[in-house]
Structures are given as structure tokens and as C-alpha cells.
Image (spheres, grey):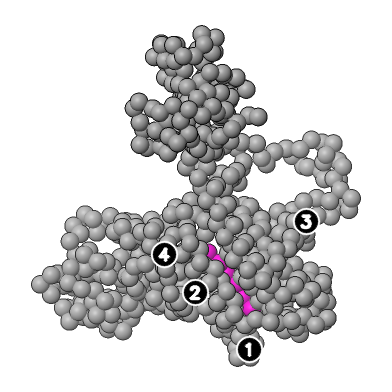
Amino acid sequence: MYRSHSCGELRPSDTNKEVTLSGWVQKTRDKGFMIWVDLRDRYGITQLMFDEERTSAKVIEKAKTLGREFVIQVKGTVIERESKNANIPTGDIEVLVSELTILNESIVPPFTIEDQTDGGEDIRMKYRYLDIRRNPVKNNLMFRHQVGMKIRNYLSQEGFIEVETPYLIKSTPEGARDFVVPSRMNEGQFYALPQSPQTFKQLLMVGGMDKYFQIVKCFRDEDLRADRQPEFTQIDCEMAFVEQEDILNIFEGLTRNLLSEIKGVEIGNFPRMTYDEAMRTYGNDKPDIRFDMKFGELNEVAQHKDFKVFNDAELVVGIAVPSGASYTRKEIDKLIDWVKRPQVGALGMVYAKCNNDGTYKSSVDKFYDQDDLAKWAEVTGAKPGDLICVLSGQSHKVRAQLSALRMELAERLGLRNPEEFAPLWVVDFPLLEWDEDTERYHAMHHPFTSPKPEDIALLDTNPGDVRANAYDLVLNGNEIGGGSIRIHDKETQALMFDHLGFTPEEAKAQFGFLMDAFQYGAPPHGGIAFGFDRLVAILGGQETIRDFIAFPKNNNGRDVMIDAPSNIDTEQLKELNIQLDL
Ligand code: ASP
């Protein structure tokens, strides 16, 4: 028996017990006549004591050879500590050791395995197994497990069945690139790893499973933006005989339940906002509504003077920064530089200070008088003491720029409190999205999303105006879930493929299996998928998903620990019939 107790378990009530513990040596303190060792396992730390007077000389001698991260087993007696440590749950006791076995030695670890480590990100990733021994990482993984269990319980109680779907499939078009896997047995042919189980879960509905879920790995070969992973986990769900309302209700319930049980935060009905409203009010389809700074569109009150920049713009739009009137000239110039960074891309920024005495001072006083500026204040909701920041240009660009500024300012003003939770549904997304590069419409969500019936007629005339039965769940400025009511008849699906530029032959070659299935009594259905990694990170009060993944990839999509991706040998390539022209 390696242990009778864990290292997090013993209390004063265990005094005088004979115990056996196993774990890692976190640190040793050798005072000559006495040696103390902090012994660690997943459950905590227990102090061991080797005392010249009470422990045999042989054991003491062995104890002196212990180094950091040695794996040991000890037998001993629980005694009350003289100087107690209130910081750890086992801090009132220690174990007086009588026997010591070294189960395995360790070379000196490349960083200290403590909460505050001296190891940088790169080295910790290379030795991730050591990093996982540290509380911050270990606790995150345990937290992830807990959230996963709650989700499984909730959905099971609601009648959902977890069904596994295959990883070696044919490409699912979700807008990103597929990872592909060559097939040895089918020369020259490839599987794709699923970007999501989308078509399979729809087929499960045709199969009568009624309510499906799966906590499942998905793979997308995208250029990695900060904090994206090429493989990530979704809580994937689908339901038959439902309308949008049914789906929103179940998943609002799930989210409310998680917030209540994990964070102790009670939230009533989640607000809903149309995509259009979100874009107009926050410049973003995943607005952070924990704070205000709503957009005020200023065209009407700013395009009547000689200021050419505004007059030429499709949209003039501003926000009121709380207490921003006190910013110095230098601070404002810095803000202007910030919006002009290539990542944001604004050409400049106009501002107006709302002085506490009710007057205004703007960067365009030459063009606008006090009455004009008072109107700007009214439209942006600026109060005395605030600063109005105004951007102008092409609508979609300007909205994105002002949204970036709004988030940056909120961060600086401390308005993005990770312990505050503001979920909302964004609904009525456009069905199609114009792609400048390919000069074609793409499905904004995916090609299986149904148009709103009342908008179908617009498909031929104004495709960009057709709204979809699609929705996103947004939490604190993050999209944590998205889904839609699906097309469930062959004709509408064919119409959709047609509008996406597929010939009937191409549609049949790629999605024939789905269109075939739709001919055998496909029920009306719809679903949603939550990003599990991000949800866990947000509930954990952090925004970096990497910290909640046991073995994440770095920003170049590499696993630096196992050194993947890597070359494979010629034999393997030959077997796969792949020739590399290097
Ligand atoms: N498959 C979709 C996605 O991954 C979610 C859904 O429509 O259910 O975004």
C-alpha cells in the first residue's frame, strides 16, 4: 500500500495515528539535528519531520540525500506542530517519520514547482507535466472537470444523450480550413478532422435521437489569433422538434445554472439583442454589456458644417468616456495614436471635452459651436466631465474601430470586472456575408442554417438582407456559443447551396449524404455549440484558454513538449503514397 492518506488530509484529530504517505518533495529544510520536508501530492502538502532523537540514523542519512521533486514514501506518526501554519489545511500537524523509501529520484527541475514560479511561459510549456504539478494549473484542470460534470448532469437531466461522432470524416464547411489525414488504404484520398460534428448531429436527428450532446474535440486550421487553439473543445448539442425559443431556453438554463452553482451569481432572463442593434450600439456582434459607452450615431448632428472629413464619411459615430474630460492633451494624443495603430486602423479621432461648467471644448471648434457639441453630448449620452471620442468613415470599419477603442478604454477604466457576469443573446444574424476576397456570399454561420421564412423571398433580390434563424450566446464580450435552426428539407437546402455558388453536382458530391437523408423524414431541428475552453476560462475568472487546457499548443500551433508537428520518415510517406517536393 503506497499510502493510507493523501497529503491534504491529516488534521489534529489524527494525532498519534500511524500513517503512510507518498508524494513529491517540494522542499527540504535541514537544520542538522532536524530535517523538515514539504511533501506534495494533488491534494495538498504535509510537513514531514525527521528528528535526530526520534528517527533512526539511517533514515536521517537518507533524508539528507533528498532533492526537489524526488518521489518518496514515508511511514510515521502524526504529531501536533509546535509552530502552526495557518496558510495550509494541514498546517496544524506534521508527520514524525520512522521509515523512508525513495520511490524515484528527480533531476533538478528547470523551474520551481510553486504557485509563484520562476519559469517563463515557454519553459513551462516544454515541461508542461511539471507545470501541471503547480497549483494554478492543477486547480484549473480540476475546475474544468467540475464544470464538465455539471454540464453533463444538467443536459442528461434534460434528456440529452451523449453520442460520439467520428473524427475521421469528410470536410465540414464551417468557414475554416480542415486538417486532413491521408488514408493508407485508399490511395490518394484523405479524411478531414471535424471542424465540428455539425452534419453528424443533424443526421442523429434524422435518426430520431431527439436530444443529443457531446463534449467533443473540434479542429480548425486557422491562422492562430491570440488565444485560439487549433484543437479545442465544444459542448455540441442538437434537438429535434424545436424552435429557436426552445433552444434558447434550455441553454440559457444551462448557463444560468453554471453561473449560480459555480459563481454564486443569480441572473434573471438574459437580455436579447438583434445583430443589427448590437452592431449599431456596440459596433460588435459580441458586445460586453457590463458597462455602457454605447455608440451615438452623429451623422445628423455633425454633417451640416464644412468639416469635410465628417461630410465624406458614411458614418460618424462617438462614445462618451466617463470622466474623460480630465484627460490631459498628452493622454488624448496617446489615445489618438492608439486608434491609429495598424491593428485598429482609424485615420484619426475627433474629441470633445464636456467641461463640468456645461461648456464644451473640442478638437474641431473651428467647425462646431457649443450648440452643435451639446447635441453630440445628447446623442452619445455624455455628461459633464466626460470625453466624447468620435470616429468616422465606412460604417463597418468605423464600428470595428470604435468598438476596439471602447473595449480598450473599459479595460483601462477597470470596467471589465471578471467577477461580474453579463450574458446576452444576439439573434437574427444575417444568413449570408459578402466576402471581398472571393467576391461571393458565404454562409455567415454555416450552410445548414435556415433563413427566416419571411425573408426567403429576398434571397434573389437582396441576399445580404436575409436574416437567419441563428443566435449567439455572448458573455462579457466573448462569444461562448452559437447555433441555429437548420434547414430540414431537400429543396431549401438545395436552394441554399445554389446561393452559395455550388453547382448541383458539387452540392451532391459534398453533401449528397445529407440531402439524401432529408428525403427520409427529417424532423425540424436546431442546435447550438458552446466553446468549452473559453466558457471554463471565463467562469474561472480568467481569459486565457491555454491555462485551462492540459497540453495546449503555442501561438504557432506547435506542441513544444512533444515537438509536433514534425517530419515523418520516408517509409511512412511511401506507404501513404505521398511525395514531398522539398
Ligand atoms: N457547428 C456550429 C459551430 O461549430 C454550431 C451549431 O450550429 O450548432 O459553430
Nearest to the observer: residue 116 or residue 301: 116
Which residues are drawn in magenta? 480-485
Query: The disc labelled 4 sits on which kind of residue?
Result: Val
Disc 4/disc 3 C-alpha distance (Å)? 40 Å
The dominant secondary structure in magenta is strand
Three-letter amino acid code at the position of disc 2: Trp
Q: Mark 3 is on which residue type?
A: Leu
* Closer to viewer: mark 4 or mark 1: 4
Side of 68 relative to 386 (left or right): right
State which quadrant residue 582 falls in.
Answer: top right
**Distance in Å between CA atoms under marks 1 and 3:** 35 Å
Mark 1 touches mark 3? (CB < 8 Å): no
Q: Which mark sits nearer the N-terminus, 4 or 3?
A: 3
Q: Identify the mark at residue 425; answer none if there is no mark.
A: 2
Q: Which residue is mark 4?
A: 265
Disc 3 secondary structure class: loop
Dot 4: what SS? loop
Residue 345: assigned label: none
Determine the image quadrant of residue 295.
bottom left
- Disc 2 and disc 4: Cα gap in Å? 18 Å
